[in-house]
Image (tube, helix red, strand yellow):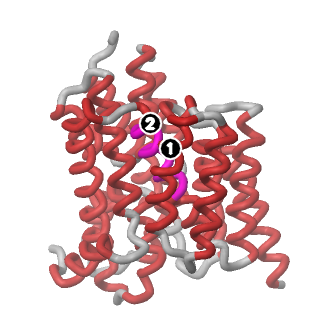
Amino acid sequence: MINTKYFLKGLFCIKSANSPAIALFASFIAIGALFKSIGLNINESVFSTFLTYALPGSLIMAESLIVGASLLNIFLAVWLVNARLYPMTVSLFPLLTHKSQPKLKYYLACHFIAVSAWLIMKENYKSVERRYRLDYWIGVGAANLTVAVSATALGFFIADYLNKDMMIGLAIVNPVYFTCVMVGAMKTIQMSLAVILGSVLGILFYFISPEWCILLGGFTAGTLAFFIGELNVN
Amino acid sequence: MSINIILAILATSLATYISRFLGVITSKKIKENSKIFKWFNCLAYSTLSALLARLIIFPAGVLAEVDYFIRFIVVFICLILFLICKKNFVYPTVLSALLLAFLSSNF
């Protein structure tokens, strides 16, 4: 089913120097503490992270529970903020396909798509033989999900010891880590434009629609970056 | 709290899984070295950047209680540190938490 050697190789990526483990851990501790403060119990908190495994979506769920939004509202708001996972999947999975892998495995393995594991895979896929890339990916994803779930549980238990300033400190870690990653990814004109235009347009579109700004801003910026990059190469 | 927590968790995870699921379906038709793949790669990075910019400038939750100028300074200093330290990820991430916790409790 899964090649153990490559699975373990992927799993141990979490220990590497540029691993997202610290950022992931800090932000899910904050989520665990937040869940406790809004009245979830430990099982619900752990299951929420295990099943959703996408930070902005969990934050929206927590905020919606506080204001008492409807289920449909939660569904739509989470879908909008997490729709970025769609282009992320499409820009990763074609690198992992191999005819020897069963189809069902892809539908299970896509649950691991989240920015942390995605970035590790984008960096490392070339070093893994194509046939075993999916197994490697499942290792990377399992390691990241385990960190997220354990941090949620820990955050839940230590919630009473975290004051507001500590929560604020934990909340900034993830945005800072990913800002660094994005700046690190600016290696070609196309990538640099995608990152810079994405942040600028994401903010500008916020003034038109806070719900749609990520998708509209991201789509416009990515498309512009693609065409300018292509023109530049030609 | 008016609605069932379990249902909220299920709605959240379903709404999240849909995008991953549709992504796998689309992936089947896309070749690694095609233009479409490159375009999707740009879209992935630009939507992530849009999300990040939003999280930093218009945050939700506790971060919203910190003055935007302080948030901006912290991100800026950490980014400079990241570039100085030859793209080491550990120093800027650890510093960001300490710096923001310190600044928000003192200013």
Which of the numbered marks, if any, corresponds to residue A165? 2
CB atoms of marks 1 and 2 within 8 Å? yes
Q: Chain of mark 1?
A: B
In the rendered image, the quadrant that contains the C terminus of chain A is bottom right
Q: Quadrant of residue A29?
A: top left
Q: From which residue to which does the magenta span run? A: A165-176
Q: Is residue A50 visible?
A: yes
Please determine if labels 1 and 2 lie on a single subunit.
no
Residue that extends furthest to the front in the rendered view of this protein = B106
Q: Chain of mark 2?
A: A
Is B7 placed above or below A29 here? above
Residue that extends furthest to the top in the rendered view of this protein = B2
* x and y percentages locating residue A209 in the rendered image: 70, 31
Which of the two residues, B37 or A71, is positioned nearer the viewer here?
A71
In the displayed structure image, the side of residue A183 where residue B95 appears, left or right: left
In the displayed structure image, the side of residue A143 where residue A187 appears, left or right: right
x 66%, y 50%: residue: B73
